[in-house]
Image (tube, rainbow, N blue to C red):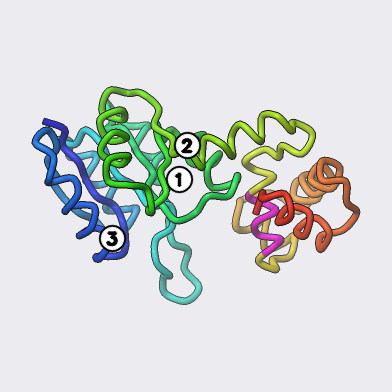
Amino acid sequence: MIRVLLADDHEIVRLGLRAILEGAEDIEVVGEVATAEAAIDAAARGGIDVILMDLRFGAGIEGTRVMGGAEATRAIRRGDNPPKILVVTNYDTDADILGAIESGAVGYLLKDAPPAELLAAVRSAADGDSALSPVVADRLMTRVRTPRTSLTPRELEVLQLVAAGASNRQIGQDLMLSEATVKSHLVHIYDKLGVRSRTSAVAAAREQGVL
């Protein structure tokens, strides 16, 4: 029996996932959590084979930072005999996909995946095999074919914050980097995208499907 934990801040999503999973004789949903921190705590207690992890969890109290699924995945994978992590999310940018996989997720599905695809992915994850939705696999292959515009996960994080309107100082604070390091990342981003400004970088990244 594959023991599954659902980690998503939307109850209706958890109900939908549970309905699909509990229709399979070899899968048991052993719990649900609504925050990344709760997922880490549940994983530490054991008794879980696979966690279906969302990437982004609701807004926190004003001025506070909310832990994301990729960060939680890293924390869980550092534990002893950790469960496998299968990301199930609405987000399909390169930054999200690469960040999740780099953090240790064995699979990445979008929430509109067919039930049969979800069940197959859970079984693959439980066996330690990778499980990527066709859309995600295609994005990764496109990235491999265009190495010049391939940004590192950290560069993608910086670019996401630039797109959100953050200053270099704010980016440094969010990612725990010096402003000099942020500027260095921006130089590399501009070079890879063939642009000379923040606005152009964001526009080019969106045009190429990076953001």
Report the quarter where the N terminus lies: top left
Residue at left offset 45%, top offset 46%:
71
Reading the chain from its start, which is encountered first: label 3 or label 2? 3
Report the quarter where the C terminus lies: bottom right
Looking at the rendered image, the disc whose residue lies closer to the viewer, 1 or 3, is: 3
Q: Are marks 2 and 1 in contact (CB under 8 Å)?
A: yes
Which amino acid type is marked by label 3? Val
Residue 103 is marked as 2
Which amino acid type is marked by label 2? Ser
Image coordinates of residue 22 in percent, x first then y, are 12, 46
Instruction: Give the main secondary structure of the magenta stretch.
Output: helix
Residue 13 is marked as 3
Residue at left offset 38%, top offset 40%:
75
Residue 70 is marked as 1
Image coordinates of residue 16 in percent, x first then y, are 23, 58
Q: Which residues are magenta?
A: 157-163
Quarter of the image for residue 139 reads: top right
Image coordinates of residue 44 in percent, x first then y, are 23, 39
